[in-house]
Amino acid sequence: MTEPHTEAVPFDPFADDEDDLTGIVAELQPEDYRAQVGIRAREQALSTFRSQSKESHSDRTVANGMVTLPFIPLIPLEDALKEPGEPAPQLSAGDVVAGQYEIAGVIGHGGMGYIYLANDRNVSGRMVVLKGIRAQAEAQQIGAAEAEREFLASISHPEIVKAYNFVDDPRVGGLIVMEYVPGPSLSSQQQNQENGVFSLDVAIGYILEILPALEYLHSRGVLYNDLKPDNIILTEDQVMLIDLGAVSGIGAFGYIYGTKGFQAPEVATEGPSVASDIFTIGRTLASMVVHMPKEDGVMQDLPTPDDEPLFAHNMSLYRLLRRATDPDPKERFQDVRTLETQLYGVLREFLAVHRDEQFPAQHSLYSPQRSTFGTKHLVYRTDQLIDGIERSVKITSEEINAALPVPLLDRSDPGASLISGSSYSEPSEALETMRQAMNQEEFATSKEIPLAVVRSLLDLGFIREARSWLEKLDSTMDTDWRHIWYSGITHLLLDDYAGAQHAFNEVYNVLPGEPAPKLARAAVSELLLQDRGKNNTKLLDSSVALAAANLEGEAIAEVGGTWRHLASKPEILRFKAIYLYALVWKTNPTTVSSAFGLARQLMAEQQVDMAVATLDSVSPASTHYRMAELTAILHLISGELTESRIRRAARRIEAIPNNEARFLQIKVAVLNAGLNWLREHQLDAAAAASDLLGYPFTQRGLQVGLYESLRTLARSAPNAHHRYALADMANKVRPMTWF
């Protein structure tokens, strides 16, 4: 049976005319009429294609809708050609290479000579790029050169220019024939930007667009080696990698091409690796967003936040770049996917802080926050009016640990399926399952199984045993971020706050786009202050506290470059607690623990109005919205009292339904604050004549209000003893009467 194949189908635009006008017209025209109609139809189609390709197109959104990249028009052929410099190029316009490629001119110059634009005579109208490939001087490297050509020819990715052919020419040696992309380079586009740099969101958008191409190369065992803005082309609605002349296999030796300032320092001694390509990504991003220091035209080390305002305003970006370009390749991101995930996090943070745009966390290595900490203490403290039991307003290590996000399971780990299957087991059963699995050969390389043992021990309350187990894993997993995270958790639960601070800071360095280590660091800073009895002490100038809460980069300079070291001084701990709580809340408005934490720190700094405003930003859709309302009321009547704040608190409690469980006790707190304020200032009545919660804002009026409210509360007391205590309290506050 013959397989179907491609064949032509005759089409006649006049074949179905009912009046058979075709025949009439054909008789009146030359015999080639039908052929002329076909030619005109093709010309019209080409004309339409060419005109539409020149029309203005709209911009496009990338990075899951977070970034808008501009539409970039194609560069006309005459504008692409450049005047050659010295020395003169070996090929000139009109020269023909390999009997096929007619040179149109020079479009650039690279490390391997001039780059030519040529017309491919075998493919009508197609322009191609001719560029030199790596010279192989040694006879034993011939095999490597052939292998290089083979994988270049096999590369096929929409964001990588295609390698069409490899030719040799006696004038220039070996050439690679590549697809021509008629667009500006990222470097030339950057020169047109304000101040000569891209905005951070656009720069990250471009990098995120090109990362899949690099990940594709790495998956094929190929390294790009020479990523830089000059080798990224912007064309209409696409970003493309050009210049494949420097690619090599992973672990290749010999001549490894790259660009000084972008190439990783270890390439000359250890050879190229995925980590060396990661280095070029970090350097490329850095060069796009800041003016990097240069010496003899070569980029030098990253500036610090002390010298570069962008880094001072975006500490997570700085940490990401610092890790991507670490001199030690083992300290860098180990693959493109991990770097990509953290770039998304840094981008979300930038847009939230500087554009007031929040986006869901679609890329993260952590679960959402499991519960909350520090959200109920202040309101629950008023329950003492109901039952007489005094309650603490301190946060604890246990509640912080219960609320913090947990690392997500690595699905590529050999033990992932086993752990998923035991996720609903009791911790003791899960522990036994993990113990048996570690003795099986198929799970010998699993990292998730030993970590699952740690999680089970923590769930069972065996903190010291978990600490001991982590120490046994130090030799194999001490640099794994999950090992560091759980080390921080064990330090936290053992009340070793300094150790926890160090571990969570290390995780922040490794995963700068994740909110979890920032939230953990803020909480530990608060615990350190609480442990030293400074949790309610004002420690900062008001301007610094407000700058930290508003995430102003200049605030870092005000407290002495705190990015350099871990905090130990109380004032720096307070600053970092405010800054990190604010950063997490601004970026992740569902993480309400950070809102309450920020409000507590601001209250300690006597920034009452800003603390209240923070709690007001909790969404009405949140289950913690009512608790935020009640806490804001209590904050208004804490600290230094004013008539304005007392009345604001009263208006807020009046807006809450009186069937709220704690309505009456919050009302008592507001009335009591009003009475205390009048007595403190030796006033009989407030300046304004309006009532406070239905009672005259006078000492006598508020005494009556307190008396009646306490009597009502007494009816709800859980036992007779406290009921009598509330009645006595009401009688003591009741104003003196003659009858």
Image: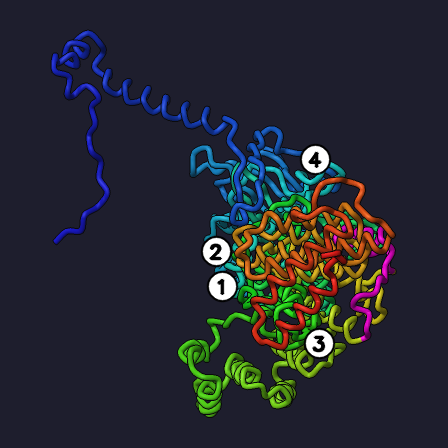
Tag shown at residue 220: 1
Q: Are marks 2 and 1 in contact (CB under 8 Å)?
A: yes
Query: Residue at 23% across / 11% down in the picture?
Result: 30
Q: Quadrant of the C terminus?
A: bottom right
Q: Earlier in the sequence, mark 4 or mark 3?
A: 4
Gap between marks 3 and 1 measured at Cα = 40 Å
The part of the image, by quadrant, that contains residue 79 is top right
Query: Residue at 64% across / 49% down in the picture?
Result: 652
Q: Secondary structure at mark 3?
A: helix
Residue, disc 2: 155
Q: Nearer the viewer, residue 345 or 665?
A: 665
Residue 42 x %, y %? 34, 25
Residue 564 x %, y %? 81, 65
Gap between marks 2 and 4 measured at Cα = 32 Å
Q: Secondary structure at mark 2?
A: loop
Gap between marks 3 and 2 measured at Cα = 47 Å
Q: Earlier in the sequence, mark 2 or mark 1?
A: 2
Residue, disc 3: 500
